[in-house]
Image (cartoon, helix red, strand yellow):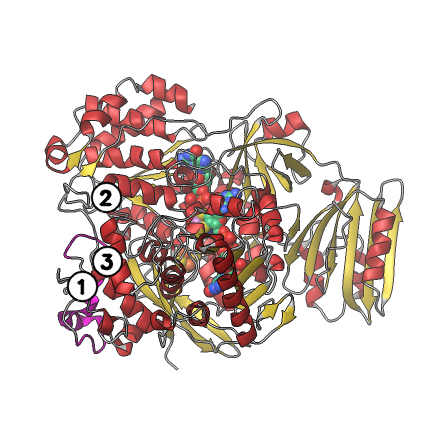
């Protein structure tokens, strides 16, 4: 079998992958011909083959927790939605969807809600992610468009990364930057982030600014460029409006003033400004450190202002670059998945409504935008939305004020969840669960951060009764009486309709245009397949070619099957790498807009009760709420528990010990997390990862703390700056249990702490409890009640309890409890004992000591996930003379596959060999 060419389902880099059979399993590798990654994959992409088993999958529809037929489930959804609409109107229902749907799924969901149900109430998790960038782009460009492409990241002479931890979140794009800088050491990189992240590793300058202060920095930059005469006046005069207000608005933003506002050294600010003024080929990459803010849109425009004023936009190596998070965040924007867009870059304007309405032949077109995610869930809580369908997102974890979201779900009369996993924190509250096809099974397209549309192709059969999301939506639509608009035979027909809508009466008025796909010459452009039989749809006539287009007759199945990755807009000659290169924008006068933005601090400032600013974000090896990446031991080897990163000064002041537990709290909720002291954190700021859900932890959801304050224009929540109180968590004991099976609630006491970690051959349960240890052990032993022999030891005075359950020499479970977390032994060696069928005598004797017998080494915490190389092994290699990343690669293979761990290898080298690192 030839390898299947498909696309990674995780981040917005959108890497091409090749999948082929390898024995019983699948071999997943980077596609050398895909223009996003040229063969590279990061640790998550490389581990895709390990997440394909059906463990934890939802395989059958369920109604009220009972298995149901598809007919019953679909009828129930259609009937309940129709009943709510009949009684309370169409705005009493809503869809909450996701940038992890394929474009085809997304298209029909949006069409059903906005065109047929007749409400704008469809919003997406991209609201939490990209909506500030969308709104900023629209204000500046008249359209939501990322002008640049990945090559720009490589050919820029100055690359500014603002609020982006690309080393962990867009690892392959980052690896391309690393390679570019290596080839061209003169390339300069500036990282702007309150924390020193792995991304800062390649930075020539790191500006650890005060959380939320970016707008001051960029206004000061514009002022500096103006004063240094570094603006491109010819460009401004020809292509920009609004500078008459925007430029005066920056005077007064002096370097000393900015440095004070941002908590930076004047010299560092001056150096950044000098580099920017001196370097025409500058790319500014921005991500959630900018977007996720109550003034996110203004921050985006503060950045765009600078690029417009210098004419550095849409040129090779010179552009602003909003780098998107999810695999299809961009596709969602293209189909109009946000509540305040219509479809195909058309808006809720009279013309947009008229055009989309005619194209869809829509019986009940929504007349106005619907509720944005945070407002939508508040409307659910207030009882205004009575039927809610959630697809491919886990809001009980990922929305702000997550505990209130759970209450809203509980109170909602009818909740439908389409997911691939049986039980998520969200789906446990669903009245109807619908099993969706997962990556490897589903078929369609996604758009990556550089506007590149790639195919996801199936290589697995649909398991159980799982069905693709588009099919589920269409079936519900038909049962609601909308057969005419939802009769697609497959994703190719939906894509053809979407492409046709993008071209429908476009005539150059909308940049999102796939019209070229429909035109015969494109066929010759080598995109493959036997294409169009219908003339291009860009005519300005008002007679819709829709009857043909909607049946997908303009675009053949074969062409869809073989579609090679391309960048929109696409004309008859192919895709487009860069936008706005000609200085023409999509505003009524064709000029871009500069805006006089006013910097605002985060909406909620720390106070005496909540003195810390909580920042939240991602870690290298986990994807969001871990429903898929949590399934592979390899990806949990790097970081395995919810943690709190805190500066040592703060930790000492609060009496927090590294490795102990902290409790974070505010009026919204609380979180327990493992303390990690780090000088990479600012004093007064703390960081926690977003990934842990109720599935993998007790009290480990950071979303419970985040306030639901949003940007007034975009509705994007302020995830990065939440005031919290931090204190030591005074557990009566700390411990862990390793067992061959997962323990339901980890056996922890009500209200205690637990985190579950899937190991190679056992489950690890990290615990802290309030009840007396003996009581806990009693409960644990009852739970593990099975044939076998317990060996145990305890030291009541020291509160030390250890035990192991062994049967026929095979280890079934061990537990270790101590008063202090730092008295517990390392886990790696103990975990490795579960890989054996029988323990040796030496191992059995060493077991309750928690230490390997003399001759067996402990490799330590895993740093390189690809080759399973641990910290201890690396430390030994460094001590034995390995002085560089390359040397560690040669000796241990560490860092030689995906490269995601290289920043950490460097850190270990620096720590151990300050001179060499
Ligand atoms: N491994 C992994 N990769 C992912 C994902 C994942 O779950 N796991 N998710 C994907 C998705 S959906 C997204 S949206 C992207 C997000 O990608 P990123 O935006 O790169 O990721 P985050 O970790 O959310 O935040 C980025 C950085 O913003 C910084 N920051 C916080 N406050 C400020 C501030 O006031 N100013 C500035 N300048 N910076 C600040 C944080 O310290 C953090 O390092 O990642 C994508 N890639
Ligand atoms: N505190 C804090 N919170 C945040 C953020 C932050 O930085 N800080 N970032 C925000 C951002 S940028 C994002 S993008 C969100 C992400 O948050 P979510 O979207 O809630 O996270 P996921 O875990 O990706 O949820 C996807 C769900 O879809 C399921 N799924 C996967 N594939 C399919 C499929 O093909 N079909 C269907 N029907 N289901 C599928 C998965 O099992 C999973 O349950 O989190 C946001 N929340
Ligand atoms: S960088 Fe990693 S997670 Fe992102 S698309 Fe590529 S392989 Fe997937
Ligand atoms: Mo995101």
From the viewer's perspective, tell me whether residue 882 is left or right of residue 533: right
> Which mark's residue is nearer the viewer, 1 or 2?
2
Compare marks 1 and 2 and give the one earlier in the sequence: 2
Whether label 1 touches label 2, CB < 8 Å:
no
- Where's the N terminus, which quadrant? bottom left
Vertical placement of 202 versus 330: above or below?
Answer: above
In the image, the segment drawn in magenta is 507-533
Rate crowding at label 1 as few (under 14), some (14 to 19) or many (20 or more) other CA atoms within 10 Å: many
Mark 3 Cβ and ligand 2 under 8 Å apart: no
Give above or below for 766 relative to 565.
above
Q: Which of marks 1 and 3 is in front?
A: 3
- Among the two numbered marks 3 and 2 on one chain, the one whose residue lies closer to the N terminus: 2
Using the numbered discs, state the Cα–Cα distance from disc 1 to disc 2 in whole angstroms. Answer: 24 Å
Residue tagged 2: 142
Whole-angstrom CA distance, mark 3 to mark 2, is 19 Å
Q: Is residue 553 depicted above or below 783 in this figure?
A: below
Q: In this view, does 199 lie to the left or right of 523?
A: right
* Residue identifier under label 1: 574
Q: Of the two numbered discs 1 and 3 on the same chain, state the one appearing first in sequence.
A: 3
Q: Position of residue 413 (x, y in %)?
A: 59, 56
Q: Which residue extends farthest front?
A: 87
């Amino acid at each position: 079998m030839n390898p299947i060419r498909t696309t990674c389902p995780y981040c917005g880099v959108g890497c091409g992958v090749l999948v082929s059979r390898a024995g019983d399993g699948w071999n997943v590798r980077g596609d050398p011909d895909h223009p996003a990654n040229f063969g590279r994959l990061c640790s998550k992409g490389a581990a895709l083959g390990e997440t394909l088993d059906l463990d934890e999958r939802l395989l059958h529809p369920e109604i009220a927790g009972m298995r149901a037929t598809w007919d019953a489930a679909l009828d129930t959804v259609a009937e309940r939605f129709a009943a709510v609409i009949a009684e309370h109107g169409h705005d009493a229902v809503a869809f909450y969807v996701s940038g992890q749907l394929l474009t085809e799924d997304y298209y029909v969901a949006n069409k059903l809600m906005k065109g047929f149900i007749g409400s704008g109430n469809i919003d997406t998790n991209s609201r939490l992610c990209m909506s500030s960038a969308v709104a900023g782009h629209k204000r500046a460009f008249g359209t939501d468009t990322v002008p640049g492409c990945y090559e720009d990241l490589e050919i820029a002479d100055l690359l500014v990364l603002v609020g982006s931890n690309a080393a962990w979140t867009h690892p392959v794009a980052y690896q391309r930057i690393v390679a570019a800088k290596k080839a061209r050491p003169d390339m300069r990189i500036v990282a702007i982030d309150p924390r020193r992240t792995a991304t800062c590793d390649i930075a020539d300058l790191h500006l650890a600014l005060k959380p939320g202060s970016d707008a001051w920095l960029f206004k000061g930059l514009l002022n500096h460029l103006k004063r240094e005469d570094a603006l491109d006046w010819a460009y401004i005069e020809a292509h920009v409006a609004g500078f008459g207000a925007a430029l005066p608005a920056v005077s007064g933003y002096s370097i000393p003033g900015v440095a004070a506002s941002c908590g930076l050294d004047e010299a560092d600010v001056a150096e950044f400004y000098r580099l920017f003024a001196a370097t025409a080929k500058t790319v500014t990459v921005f991500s959630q450190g900018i977007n996720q803010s109550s003034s996110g849109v203004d921050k985006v425009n503060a950045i765009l202002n600078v690029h417009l004023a210098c004419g550095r936009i849409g040129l090779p190596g010179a552009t602003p670059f909003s780098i998107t998070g999810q695999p299809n965040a961009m596709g969602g924007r293209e189909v109009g998945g946000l509540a305040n867009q219509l479809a195909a870059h058309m808006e809720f304007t009279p013309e947009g409504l008229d055009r989309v309405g005619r194209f869809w032949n829509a019986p009940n077109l929504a007349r106005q935008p619907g509720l944005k995610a945070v407002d939508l869930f508040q409307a659910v809580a207030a009882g205004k939305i009575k039927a809610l369908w959630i697809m491919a997102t886990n809001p009980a974890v990922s929305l702000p004020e997550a505990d209130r979201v759970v209450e809203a779900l509980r109170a909602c009369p009818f909740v439908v969840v389409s997911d691939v996993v049986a039980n998520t924190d969200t789906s446990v509250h669903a009245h109807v669960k619908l099993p969706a096809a997962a990556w490897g099974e589903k078929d369609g397209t996604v758009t990556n951060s550089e506007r590149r549309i790639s195919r996801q192709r199936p290589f697995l059969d649909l398991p159980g009764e799982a069905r693709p999301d588009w099919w589920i939506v269409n079936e519900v639509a038909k049962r609601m009486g909308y057969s005419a608009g939802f009769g697609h035979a497959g994703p190719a027909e939906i894509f053809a309709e979407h492409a046709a809508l993008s071209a429908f009466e476009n005539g150059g008025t909308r940049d999102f245009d796939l019209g070229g796909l429909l035109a015969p010459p494109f066929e010759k452009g080598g995109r493959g397949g036997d294409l169009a039989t219908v003339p291009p749809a860009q005519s300005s006539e008002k007679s819709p070619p829709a009857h043909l287009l909607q049946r997908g007759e303009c675009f053949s199945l074969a062409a869809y099957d073989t579609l090679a990755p391309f960048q929109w807009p696409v004309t008859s000659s192919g895709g487009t790498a860069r936008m706005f290169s000609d200085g023409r924008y999509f505003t009524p006068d064709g000029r871009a807009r500069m805006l006089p933005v006013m910097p605002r601090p985060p909406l909620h400032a720390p106070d005496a009760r909540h003195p810390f600013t909580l920042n939240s974000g991602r870690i290298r090896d986990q994807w969001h709420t871990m429903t898929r990446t949590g399934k592979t031991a390899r990806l949990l080897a790097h970081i395995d528990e919810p943690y709190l990163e805190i500066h040592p000064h703060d930790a000492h002041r609060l009496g927090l010990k590294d490795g102990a537990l902290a409790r974070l709290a505010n009026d919204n909720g609380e979180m327990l997390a493992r303390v990690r002291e780090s000088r990479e954190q600012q004093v007064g700021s703390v960081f926690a990862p977003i990934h842990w859900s109720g599935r993998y932890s007790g009290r480990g959801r950071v979303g419970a703390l985040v306030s639901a304050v949003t940007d007034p224009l975009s509705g994007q929540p302020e995830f990065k700056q939440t005031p919290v109180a931090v204190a030591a968590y005074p557990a009566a004991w700390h411990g862990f249990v390793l067992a061959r099976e997962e323990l339901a609630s980890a056996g922890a006491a009500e209200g205690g702490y637990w985190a579950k970690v899937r190991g190679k051959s056992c489950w690890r349960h990290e615990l802290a409890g309030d009840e007396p240890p003996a009581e806990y052990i009693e409960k644990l032993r009852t739970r593990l009640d099975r044939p076998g022999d317990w060996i145990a030891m305890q030291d009541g005075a020291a509160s030390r309890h250890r035990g192991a359950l062994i049967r026929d020499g095979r280890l079934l479970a061990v537990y270790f409890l101590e008063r202090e977390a730092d008295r517990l032994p390392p886990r790696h060696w103990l975990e490795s004992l579960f890989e054996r069928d029988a323990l040796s005598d030496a191992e059995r004797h060493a077991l309750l000591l928690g230490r390997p017998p003399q001759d067996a080494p402990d490799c330590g915490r895993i740093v390189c996930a690809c080759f399973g190389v641990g910290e201890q092994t690396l430390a030994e290699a460094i001590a034995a003379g390995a002085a560089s990343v390359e040397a560690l690669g040669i000796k241990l293979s560490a860092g030689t596959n995906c490269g995601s761990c290289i920043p950490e290898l460097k850190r270990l080298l620096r720590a151990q060999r300050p001179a060499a690192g």
